[in-house]
Amino acid sequence: MLMASAMLALTGCNVGVHSVASGSADECAVCFVSTDSYDISVDIDGTVYELKTVKQKSYKAHRDIKARANEQIIITPGRHKVKVMRDGKEVYSKEIFVSATETKVIEI
């Protein structure tokens, strides 16, 4: 009788298996550094962005470049064709691969 009461009490307490899913956003970023800060036009898979390069002196490996949200482009993980133009001239052209949550830093 005591065993039956305990079983009945536990089934009424909503005891069971629960799961919670979490993780990082499925996005990444591309940032461009150079010896000086200047305007560039970046074409990623046919979409054009206008932004400035991050001055290489101000970018250091121990700093969080993600804080420079105005100077980076948020993209989806995977392969992308990137072309960078400065003053109407192509200064960088390459197919890149970016992993989820990665910030790819490209020197030009």
Image (cartoon, helix red, strand yellow):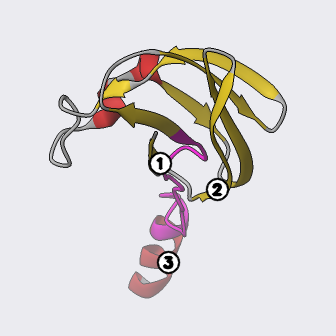
> Would residue 20 be counted in the magenta stretch?
yes
- Residue 102 at x, y = what percent? 47, 51
Give the amino acid type for the residue marked by disc 3 in the picture: Met
Asked if the residue at tag 3 contacts the one at tag 2, i.e. Cβ–Cβ closer than 8 Å, the answer is no
Asked if labels 1 and 2 touch by Cβ distance under 8 angstroms, the answer is: yes
Q: Identify the residue position indicated by label 2 in the image.
A: 96
Mark 2: secondary structure: strand
Closest to the camera, between mark 2 and mark 3, is 2
Point 34% across, 23% down: residue: 68
- Mark 2 Cα within 10 Å, few/some/many (few <14, many 20+)? few
Distance from the alpha carbon under mark 2 to that under mark 3 = 59 Å
Residue at the image position 30 percent from the left and 35 percent from the top: 65
Report how far apart the C-alphas of labels 2 and 1 lie in the structure: 9 Å
Q: Amino acid at mark 1?
A: Lys
Describe residue 51's horizontal placement relative to residue 76 as left or right: left
Q: Nearer the viewer, residue 9 or 74?
A: 74
Q: Which residue is mark 1?
A: 104
Q: How many marks?
A: 3
Name the residue tied to disc 3: 7
Q: Position of residue 72 (x, y in %)?
A: 48, 27
**Secondary structure of the residue carrying numbered label 3:** helix
The residue segment tinted magenta is 10-29
